[in-house]
């Protein structure tokens, strides 16, 4: 597979920050420091995430034991099912990732890449290259895969497999990954320049894995657990101390925390998006805390009276949301079926809260979703109020309705604060005045790649199918990474363009648009190869995805693939 242009560079913030002219917006990526370092706040955030994880799991287990001792076996069984089943699913997925990352790569096809330096002798090749380049590429291909501990002996490898098996059997995969990310982050602060970049890349990859695993676990475990415990409290007409109330609170905090944490890690992983400050993260946690709280409270009230109709409502809402997401043609995964499964999982998220899954302007889509959720909350709460049992007094009923309404209002207020004051791309208060003000989370600011010449654009056209390129390279082809010489036109780029000297890893795939992860974060084959090449290169390389510049090039590419 051959691309017609060099594409847009992807920086992992390992470059010196350029000067920022006064004519540019101070929030633009050109004007922010390109260097990203692991900070004390990042360390504290990871420790707090561990605390949230343990609090959520411990409160659920404590509650299950409490139900068993009180001989409430039905509630005990439901509580335990919502703890064990999601945890097992996450552990299996995590161990599958570990097995792929730690397994030794015997094929050189996974390292079909070139590290090309401008004006130097560092020209590495794996295809149509001279003997020197092929020899160096063979050395790169023979490097140990990421996670092998630098070619550990057989006994050490066996010990690692046994250790990871024990970790996953005891349902502690997330804890191990948090600790590992913490270790990699600390090492990125203490090591030398080149090693620091390698540890930081590894830490970002580990953080991405944790975010995806914990987000999946939160909506498979914490969300249904929250609805279950609220329903039990409504039916029991009391909040037993340190049992359902504590479990519901921990589940709600876990849900809100993971949505905000996922968005922060996703933004940190992309060089075309400004990072999210911790002030913005806290406001986003409060936003989701109150909106999800109101949503689950409405669910619990309705389910306490209409159990069957509540199940029908949840299934219908999930089907509609999933169809809406699929119709929007998301671009998160590397194959068609993975994308469908992902859309089905996001449909579960949409039962409880908004989650951006498409590039472009989200104002209309978010408004439609918010109005739908508002109408549903009002309908569910009203039906409960009209058909509640005689055991609920009018005062208690009105109080519960007020709790739902005030919680949703507070969540909407914090959402406005986030978008109006603390959004990383700047305030979005003037939506009606120009295109620049109309974007939300998934509309990126002008990136450094936007200053490239016309034949090198920042993203591929929408006419390129997502799966065509992947299917070409999935059958063992070594052409995911494409070898080509550095173009001479890059030597005359403007001062604010990304770094063009030094090693380059060119990936012959179109770059995914925000809010999707870059391919080298979700495709573990690319990740292993990039880490191996990064370890071998004397200077930290930059990553460059394929891009097509003109309609003629699009036609030529589609007719030659």
Image (spheres, helix red, strand yellow):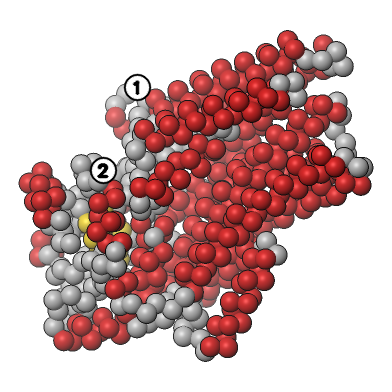
CA distance separating discs 1 and 2:
24 Å
Task: Using the rendered view, name the quadrant where residue 463 is placed.
Answer: top left
Give 358 or 70, whichever is nearer the viewer. 70
Secondary structure beneath disc 1? loop
- Residue under the image location 60 percent in, 54 percent down: 89
- Residue under the image location 26 percent in, 81 percent down: 137
Q: Say few, some or many: other residues with alpha carbon within 10 Å of mark 2 (under 14 / 14 to 19 / 20 or more).
A: few
Q: Say few, some or many: other residues with alpha carbon within 10 Å of mark 1 (under 14 / 14 to 19 / 20 or more).
A: few
- Residue under the image location 10 percent in, 43 percent down: 551
- Could one spot residue 501 in this view of the protein? yes
Q: Position of residue 38 (x, y in %)?
A: 51, 63
245 up-or-down from 394: above or below? below
Q: Position of residue 331 (x, y in %)?
A: 35, 45
- Residue under the image location 85 percent in, 42 percent down: 73
Q: Position of residue 357 (x, y in %)?
A: 42, 40
Secondary structure beneath disc 2? loop
Quadrant of the rendering where the N terminus is positioned:
bottom left
Quadrant of the rendering where the C terminus is positioned:
bottom left
229 up-or-down from 458: above or below? above
Task: Report the side of 438 relative to 387 (left or right).
Answer: left
Name the residue at the right extreme.
70
Q: Which residue is mark 1?
A: 432
Foreground mark, 1 or 2, reads 1
Task: Using the rendered view, name the quadrant where residue 540 is placed.
Answer: bottom left
Q: Position of residue 232 (x, y in %)?
A: 80, 32
Task: Report the side of 557 relative to 74 (left or right).
Answer: left
Q: Name the N-terminal-most of marks 1 and 2.
A: 2
* Residue 368 numbered mark, or none: none
Q: Which residue is mark 2?
A: 23
């Amino acid at each position: 597979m051959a691309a017609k242009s060099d594409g847009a560079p992807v920086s992992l913030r390992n470059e010196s920050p350029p000067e920022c002219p006064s004519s540019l917006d101070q929030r633009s990526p050109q004007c922010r420091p390109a260097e990203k370092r692991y900070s004390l706040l990042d360390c504290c955030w990871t420790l707090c995430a561990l605390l949230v994880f343990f609090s959520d799991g411990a409160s659920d287990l404590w509650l299950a034991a409490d139900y068993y001792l009180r001989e409430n076996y039905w509630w005990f069984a439901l509580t335990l099912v919502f703890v064990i089943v999601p945890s097992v699913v996450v552990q299996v997925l995590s161990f599958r990732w570990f097995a792929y990352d730690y397994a030794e790569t015997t094929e050189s096809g996974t390292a079909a890449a070139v590290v090309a330096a401008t004006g130097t002798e560092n020209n590495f090749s794996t295809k149509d290259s001279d003997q020197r380049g092929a020899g160096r590429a063979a050395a790169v291909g023979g490097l140990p895969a990421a996670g092998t501990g630098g070619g550990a002996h057989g006994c050490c490898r066996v010990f690692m497999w046994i250790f990871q098996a024990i970790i996953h059997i005891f349902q502690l995969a997330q804890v191990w990954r948090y600790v590992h990310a913490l270790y990699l982050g600390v090492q990125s602060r203490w090591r030398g320049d080149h090693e620091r970049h390698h540890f930081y890349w590894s830490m970002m990859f580990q953080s991405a894995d944790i975010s995806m695993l914990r987000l999946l676990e939160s909506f498979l475990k914490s969300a249904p657990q929250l609805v279950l415990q609220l329903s039990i409290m409504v039916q029991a007409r009391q909040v037993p101390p340190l049992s359902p109330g504590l479990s519901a609170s921990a589940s709600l905090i876990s849900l809100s925390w993971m949505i905000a944490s996922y968005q922060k890690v996703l933004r940190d992983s992309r060089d075309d998006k400004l990072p999210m400050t911790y002030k913005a993260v806290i406001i986003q946690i409060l936003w989701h805390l109150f909106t999800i709280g109101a949503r689950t409270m409405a669910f619990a009230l309705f389910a306490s009276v209409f159990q069957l109709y509540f199940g029908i409502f949840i299934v219908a809402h999930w089907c509609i949301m999933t169809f809406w997401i699929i119709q929007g043609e998301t671009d998160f995964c590397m194959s068609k079926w993975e994308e469908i499964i992902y859309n089905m999982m996001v449909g579960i998220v949409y039962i409880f809260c908004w989650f951006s899954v498409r590039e472009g302007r989200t104002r209309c889509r978010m408004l439609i979703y918010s109005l739908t959720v508002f109408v549903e909350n009002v309908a569910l709460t009203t039906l409960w109020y009209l058909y509640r049992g005689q055991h609920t007094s009018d005062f208690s009923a009105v109080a519960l309705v007020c709790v739902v309404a005030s919680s949703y209002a507070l969540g909407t207020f914090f959402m406005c604060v986030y978008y109006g004051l603390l959004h990383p791309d700047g305030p979005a208060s003037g939506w009606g005045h120009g295109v620049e003000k109309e974007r939300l989370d998934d509309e990126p600011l002008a990136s450094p790649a936007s200053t490239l010449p016309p034949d090198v654009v920042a993203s591929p056209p929408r006419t390129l199918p997502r799966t065509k390129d992947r299917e070409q390279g999935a059958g063992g082809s070594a052409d995911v990474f494409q070898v080509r010489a550095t173009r001479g036109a890059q030597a005359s780029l403007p001062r604010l363009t990304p770094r063009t000297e030094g090693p380059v890893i060119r990936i012959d795939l179109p770059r995914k648009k925000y809010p999707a992860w870059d391919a080298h974060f979700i495709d573990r084959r690319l990740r292993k190869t990039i880490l191996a090449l990064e370890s071998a290169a004397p200077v930290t390389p930059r990553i460059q995805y394929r891009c097509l510049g003109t309609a003629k090039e699009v036609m030529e590419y589609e007719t030659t693939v």
